[in-house]
Image: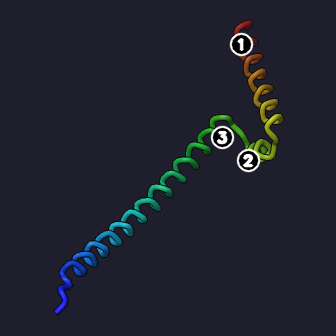
Amino acid sequence: MADFTRLNKYRAELKKMKDKRVEMDNKIRDLERKCREEENTAIHDLVHEARMTPEQLAALIGMNGAEKLDAINSKNEETEDDTNDEETD
């Protein structure tokens, strides 16, 4: 009669590994969700800190790279001008 001891051992190990895979897949999905939430919070905070309207954000997203740099540089120049104005007062 055939000895199925090793086969049963392999099947048990296979089941154990599949169960672990399911557990790991669940953990991965949970961590991916947490990453998305944290990214969204960070983006929201940046937009809020910059005091951008949804329309301004949409316009910024629609710009090409050169336009974005120009917009950022002009914003920085405005901020520097405001700072200089305050210093001269």
Q: Quarter-wise, where is residue 15 in the image?
A: bottom left
How many numbered discs? 3
Mark 1 Cα shell of 10 Å, populated few (<14), some (14-19), many (≥20): few
Tell me if residue 14 comes above or below residue 44 in the rendering: below
Determine the CA span between mark 1 and mark 3. Answer: 25 Å
Q: Quarter-wise, where is residue 88 in the image?
A: top right
Residue type at the position of mark 2: Pro
On the picture, is 68 further left or further right than 40? Answer: right
Determine the CA span between mark 2 and mark 3. Answer: 9 Å
Q: Position of residue 79 (x, y in %)?
A: 73, 22
Tell me if residue 13 comes above or below residue 41 in the rendering: below
Residue, far bottom = 1
- Are the residues at dot 2 and dot 3 in contact (C-beta closer than 8 Å)? no
Q: In which quarter of the image is the C terminus?
A: top right
Which secondary structure, mark 1? helix
Q: Position of residue 71 (x, y in %)?
A: 80, 32
- The residue wearing badge 2 is 54
Q: Earlier in the sequence, mark 1 or mark 3?
A: 3
Which secondary structure, mark 3? helix
In the rendered structure, find residue 49 and report the number of the disc placed on it: none
- The residue wearing badge 1 is 86
Q: Residue at x 35, y 72 (%)?
A: 18
Q: Residue at x 38, y 69 (%)?
A: 22
Mark 3 Cα shell of 10 Å, populated few (<14), some (14-19), many (≥20): some
Q: Position of residue 25 (x, y in %)?
A: 42, 65
Residue, far top = 88
Which secondary structure, mark 2? helix
Residue type at the position of mark 1: Glu
Tell me if residue 1 comes above or below residue 58 in the rendering: below
In the rendered structure, find residue 47 and report the number of the disc placed on it: 3
